Image (cartoon, grey):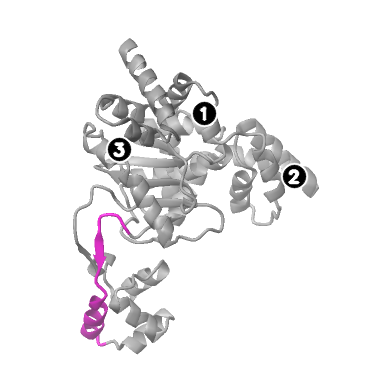
Amino acid sequence: MNNTKGGDHMGWDGSRIKVLSRERHVSLVHLAGQLKVSRQTINDWIKGQVPKGTHLVELCRFLNVSPSSFFTEETVSPISRPLHRIKGAAKLSEAMDTGARELASDYEGLFRFAPTPGLVPVLRGWKDKETARRIAQELRLRAQIDADKPIGYEHTFNLLEKLNIVCIFREFHADIKSYALYCRIHNHRVVFINTKTNILDLIFPLLHETMHAVRDGEGTTFYDEEEEAFCDVAAGHIQFPDNYVDMVFDFIDGKPIAQQINTLKMFSRIHGHSIFGIYTQIKSRHEEINLRTGGADTNLKKEFPSIGEILFKSTEPLEYISHLRKLSPLFFDIVSRQIDNPSTRKFGEWLGLDTTLDAELAHKEWRKILECM
C-alpha cells in the first residue's frame, strides 16, 4: 500500500532541513550518515524532492519534529491524497499518482452537490496488535458476521455502507496498478474499485481502505509504513477471525504439503476468499509452515468472477443498475439526487460505461426506477 503525493496540496519545504540541522548543531554530512543516505540525497531533499517512506520517518525522528514541520499548505483541495492498494510487486509511479488523482477528479462535481455525508466512526488507538484486533472485532460486529466465519465480498460491501463509505466501480487506467483507491472528496469517504479485480482479491484491499477511512486519514500526510502495516494487520483480522484460522490450521497440520494446499483450496472455494489470504493469516501464527500457494490460487480464481463481471453479467441496463444499487446504495442515492444534472457523457463516466449509447439506455432505465420508487 502506498500513497500518492497529491492530496490536500501540502507543499514540501526542504529548506527546513538546513534550519533544523543548524538549530541542533548537526552538520548535513552527519545527518546523511545517520540516515544512511548520501550527501547528494540530502541536497535533493533540500531542493524540493520529498523523502520517501522510512527516510521521511527517520528524518523527523532524528530532528525530533513532526512531518508537518516540512509541509506548507498551498491550497485547500476538495480531494484528499489518494491511497492505493497496489497489485503484487508494482511500484508507485508518477503516472499512477496522476491517474489516481484524475480518476478522483471525475467525481468532484458529483460530490460537491451531494448532501453532507453522515458521520463515519473514528477508531483510533495505538498501532499495536491488540488495537488492530479490537478494531477488527468492532467492525466484524457491525458487519454482523458469525465469529467463526470469514467475511465475504457482499458482507464487505454491506460493512462499507454501514460506515457511510461510498463505493465507485471503474475500470482503472493501465497506469493505475491497484485493486482499489481511497480518498475523501468534499468530505465524503470514497473507495474506487477496479472492476477487473477478481472478487477473491477484492476483499482484503477493501478492508484495508476501510481502515484508512475509520482511522480518519491517519498516515495520509506522508507515506507511513507503520500505519500501512497496522491497516494490513487489522484487515487480516476483519477478514479472517482467529477461530476460523485455527480451524483451518488444525485441518492441514501434519499433512503432506500437497494435501495442505488442496485443503486450503477447499476452504477458500467454500468461503470465497483467496488461498494466499488464509495462508498468510496461518503463517502469522505458525511461522514454521512454508507453502507455495501461487499456482493453486491462480487456478482457484478462474472459478470466480471479477467484480466487473458481476456488475455487467447482463447486457440489460436495468440488471446493471440493480447490481450497482445492491453493491453501492450510497453511490446510487447520490447519483439519483442529481439525475437531471449531468450530460449523457458525464453520466456514463460516473458509471464507468464505455459508450454514449450505453449511457443513454442506463439513464432512461435509472429514471424509470426512480419514478417507481
Residue lying furthest front: 357
**Which is more toward the observer, 166 or 261?**
166
Q: What are the residue bounds of the magenta stretch?
A: 6-25
- Please name the amino acid that badge 3 sits on: Val
Callout 2: helix, strand or loop?
Answer: helix
Label 3: state its secondary structure.
loop
Say which quarter of the image contains residue 24.
bottom left
In front of the other: 32 or 295? 295
Q: Quadrant of residue 352?
A: top left
Does the magenta run of residues contain 94?
no
Amino acid type of the residue tagged 2 in the rendering: Gln
The amino acid at mark 1 is Phe
**Which residue occupies 23% across, 51% down?**
77
Disc number for residue 120: 3
Residue drawn 36% across the image and 71% down it: 51
Badge 1 is on which residue? Answer: 312
Residue name at image x 52 percent, y 45 percent = 236
Mark 1 / mark 2, whichever is N-terminal: 2
Q: Where is residue 134 in the image (x, y as percent from the top left)?
A: 42, 43
- Quadrant of the rendered structure where residue 162 is? top left
